[in-house]
């Protein structure tokens, strides 16, 4: 059975890669390539890599042995690409600025807070601050700053469509900014305790 050879371009890349390896890795690489072809593979690969058959056989024997512990990890522990959260200077400040006027919290647990912005919206606003991050990074930021997903709640019949609801929130935001500009503190308070009957 005739071996289906690699293209001349692929063979040239194989030789270049082979030449960059250590002696031990050359043997292993040649053995792996030869094994792909089965019968006649050693002769063909030796011709491509311009090596002798003893090197291929030596590599085959080495591959049968367990990998030495010192060779199991080439990359040192802790190496690799670092997280954007640890490298992007100012990202946390930009995140806080984006969520400044879009954060609410639980009236019974000050550690629980949430935002009305969607992940895509947060990502888009962070881009305006010079941080083009993905929603995955947004998830990491939300977790880092202790934001939780807010559960959906039931609404009383007839209360789903509240007239001028957006206008109410805009007015609240206007008042907050007005008080802040005058140096006054602003406090957000929810007087309905979790689990209590709805106030009227």
Image: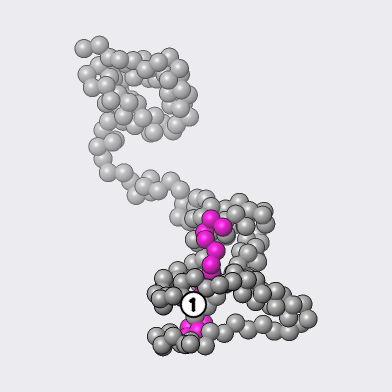
Is 51 inside the magenta-drawn segment? no
Determine the secondary structure under disc 1.
loop
Left/right of residue 171 with respect to residue 56 in the rendered view: right
Q: Residue at x 46, y 22 (%)?
A: 13
Q: Which residue is mark 1?
A: 112
Decide which of 71, 194 is in the foreground and name it: 194
Decide which of 171, 66 is in the foreground and name it: 171
Q: What's drawn in magenta, residue-wise?
A: 107-121
Q: Residue at x 53, y 52 (%)?
A: 134
**Mark 1 Cα-neighbour bin, 10 Å: few <14, some 14–19, many ≥20:** some
Q: Residue at x 53, y 69 (%)?
A: 115
**Position above or below: 135 against 157:** above
**Position above or below: 83 against 189:** above
| Colour style of the rendered protein structure | one colour
x and y, in percent, of residue 87 in the image: 60, 57
Outermost residue on the top side: it is 2
């Amino acid at each position: 059975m005739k071996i289906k050879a690699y293209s001349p371009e692929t063979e040239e890349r194989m030789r270049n890669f082979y030449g960059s390896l250590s002696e031990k890795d050359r043997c292993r690489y040649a053995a792996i390539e030869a094994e792909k072809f089965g019968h006649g593979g050693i002769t063909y690969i030796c011709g491509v890599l311009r090596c002798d058959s003893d090197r291929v056989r030596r590599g085959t024997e080495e591959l049968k042995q367990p990998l030495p512990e010192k060779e199991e990890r080439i990359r040192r522990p802790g190496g690799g690409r670092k997280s954007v959260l640890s490298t992007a200077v100012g990202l946390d400040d930009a995140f806080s600025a984006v969520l400044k006027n879009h954060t609410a919290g639980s009236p019974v647990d000050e550690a629980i807070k949430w935002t009305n912005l969607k992940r895509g919206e947060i990502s888009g606003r962070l881009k305006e601050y010079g941080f083009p991050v993905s929603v995955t990074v947004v998830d990491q930021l939300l977790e880092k700053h202790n934001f939780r997903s807010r559960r959906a709640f039931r609404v009383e019949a007839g209360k789903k469509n509240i007239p001028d609801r957006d206008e109410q929130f805009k007015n609240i935001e206007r008042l907050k900014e007005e008080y802040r500009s005058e140096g006054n503190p602003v406090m957000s308070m929810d007087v309905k305790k979790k689990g209590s009957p709805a106030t009227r």
